[in-house]
Image: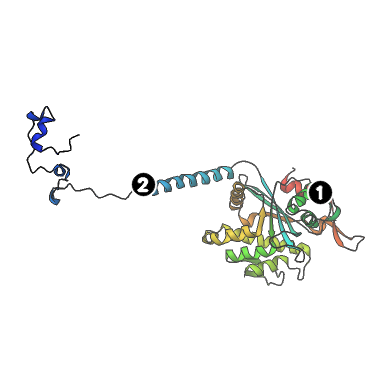
Amino acid sequence: MNDTPIHPNDYSSLDPLAETQPSPSLDYDPLAAYQPIRIPKEARPRQKARRRKSGGCLGCLGVFGVFLALIIGAMVFFAFLPGKTRVLILGIDLNSDRAPAGSFLGRSDTIVILQADPLKPQVSMLSIPRDLWVNIPGVGENRINTAHFFAEANQEGTGAQATIQTIETNFGIRIPYYVRLRFEGFSQIVDAMGGVDITLEEPMAGLDAGRHHLNGKEALAFARSRKGADDFFRMQQGQLVVMAAMKKMLNPLTWWRLPVIVPAFFSAVDTNLPVWQMPRIGLAVLRVGVDNLDHRTITREMVQPFVTEGGAQVLGPRWEVILPLVQEMFGIP
């Protein structure tokens, strides 16, 4: 093979069409064909400035708005459905010696049956004395407030349902939902609200007649006080505080505190009440008005005090008087 380089003028010997093509000059540079063509700056086309796309953010806001509207619409829909919402409210006095942190091991010293009907509208509340002597399923006869303790001590998380079963057995009324609250957590909720206001027509629990603003600690002390009164007055005091808290929560001037109130509430409360049921109760209370709630207690005339063989002072129920009251307030079942 001949390695002698071919002169550019001899390309015709290799390419039969070379005669029809211009011969490259002697100073031909093959790389020149690949050099970029430089365009003056003035001749370069200007690129349009890119606009920042805001469609993504607007889209997210739109989706969130639709989602929020669906939630609100669903809650309004469920709020106006016919029917009653019945809840058992329990205030738990923790056993400080045995109760682990965050538990509900204790007696239910506050027992309230609440029923709300937003369409009627009607809101009924019945307070049950903690010393009422009843039949506790699986235990036998004892104070009604011990039903929660016995069940909770046996298996954590069962106290509320045991109390519901006890009430259903003795009162003949079905209660699907419960809300149980630690007493010390109640004071935190009241503080998160900014306190509550109560008005007394006569001196009660160490307070003079008139209007009083109570912080969390004072509200709890008032609700549980037996100063100069018995357990029946104590139930009335508890209802006064509960209604004061309801009135405070329904006041729009309190709503800016919700970011503080909601965490305080859920840290102190255990409930099986569905979220969609909560607006039904709120709507019913709003339509009726806190001052027009049907709130009653099982009174002295409805019980017969006696002393057990063990020496405990308890209240024997007069069912012939109590059950007609339950029928009047809640209906059966």
Tag 1: residue type?
Answer: Asn
| Quadrant assignment, res 263 | bottom right
Q: At 73% from the left edge and 60% from the top edge, which residue is drawn?
A: 92
Q: SS of the residue at dot 2?
A: helix
Q: Where is residue 222 in the image (x, y as percent from the top left)?
A: 69, 68
Q: SS of the residue at dot 1?
A: helix
323 in relation to 213, above or below: above
Residue sitting nearer the eye, 199 or 283: 283
Tag 2: residue type?
Answer: Gly
Q: Where is residue 61 in the image (x, y as percent from the top left)?
A: 42, 48
Question: Is residue 201 visible in this depiction of the protein?
Answer: no
Question: Is residue 67 visible in this depiction of the protein?
Answer: yes
Q: Quadrant of the C terminus?
A: top right
Give the residue at mark 1.
Answer: 170
Instruction: Judge from the rendering whether residue 102 lies leftward or rightward of residue 138; answer left or right.
Output: left
Residue 55's disc is 2
Instruction: Judge from the rendering whether residue 11 lies leftward or rightward of residue 213; answer left or right.
Output: left
Instruction: Judge from the rendering whether residue 8 lies leftward or rightward of residue 159; answer left or right.
Output: left
Query: Neighbour class for label 1 at 10 Å: few (<14), some, many (≥20)?
Result: some
Instruction: Judge from the rendering whether residue 329 lies leftward or rightward of residue 131; answer left or right.
Output: left
Residue sitting nearer the eye, 305 or 30: 30
Q: Where is residue 119 in the image (x, y as percent from the top left)?
A: 61, 44
22 in relation to 254, above or below: above
Q: In which quarter of the image is the N terminus?
A: top left
Residue at the top extreme, as displayed = 16
Question: Mark 2 to mark 1: distance in Å?
Answer: 62 Å
Query: Neighbour class for label 2 at 10 Å: few (<14), some, many (≥20)?
Result: few
